[in-house]
Amino acid sequence: MKKRTKIILVILIIVYGAASLALHSFRNQMNNEVIHYLVDTRDYKNADLYKIYTQIGKAPVVSTTVIFADEPNARYFYRKEKKRIYQYSMASVKGTDPNYTFKHIEESLL
């Protein structure tokens, strides 16, 4: 392998590693901010939160999903906009049930 090719390959590996680390760090930060919002603002306890994960996709670009321990069949979606975290939607984990009553819906969605 030529020296120039090796240098380019090393640079690409470094850039990929840095981007992966930055993305992982950003997801952790968003997860922590949503946890902080739920615990400090909405008066939940850490034990009330079953699973939290942040995804980066299309619209909305960044979305954090929360599944509560007492309601494992529902997902609640949060996002951050202008330093404000809010719940913007919810859905069943499997399929849709029009008669399902969500326990943790926030007032802004009612």
Image (spheres, grey):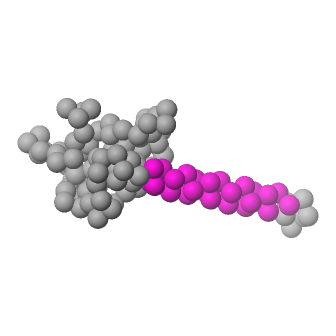
Q: Residue at x 74, y 60 (%)?
A: 14
Horizontal placement of 29 versus 45: left or right? Answer: right
In the image, the segment drawn in magenta is 7-33
Q: Residue at x 55, y 57 (%)?
A: 24
Pick whichever, 27 or 46, lies toward us.
46
Horizontal placement of 67 versus 52: left or right? Answer: left
Farthest-out residue, left:
99
Identify whether 105 is placed above or below 51: above
Horizontal placement of 80 versus 3: left or right? Answer: left
The x, y position of residue 4, in whole percent, is 90, 59
Looking at the rendered image, the quarter that the C terminus falls into is: top left
Pick whichever, 48 or 14, lies toward us.
48
Does the magenta portion include 1? no
Pick whichever, 90 or 11, lies toward us.
90
The x, y position of residue 26, in whole percent, is 55, 51
Farthest-out residue, right:
3
Residue 15: in sight, yes or no? yes
The x, y position of residue 87, in whole percent, is 32, 40
Q: Residue at x 79, y 62 (%)?
A: 10
Q: Residue at x 23, y 35 (%)?
A: 107
Horizontal placement of 26 versus 60: left or right? Answer: right
Total tally of numbered discs in the picture: 0
Identify whether 99 is placed above or below 40: above
Does the magenta portion include 22? yes
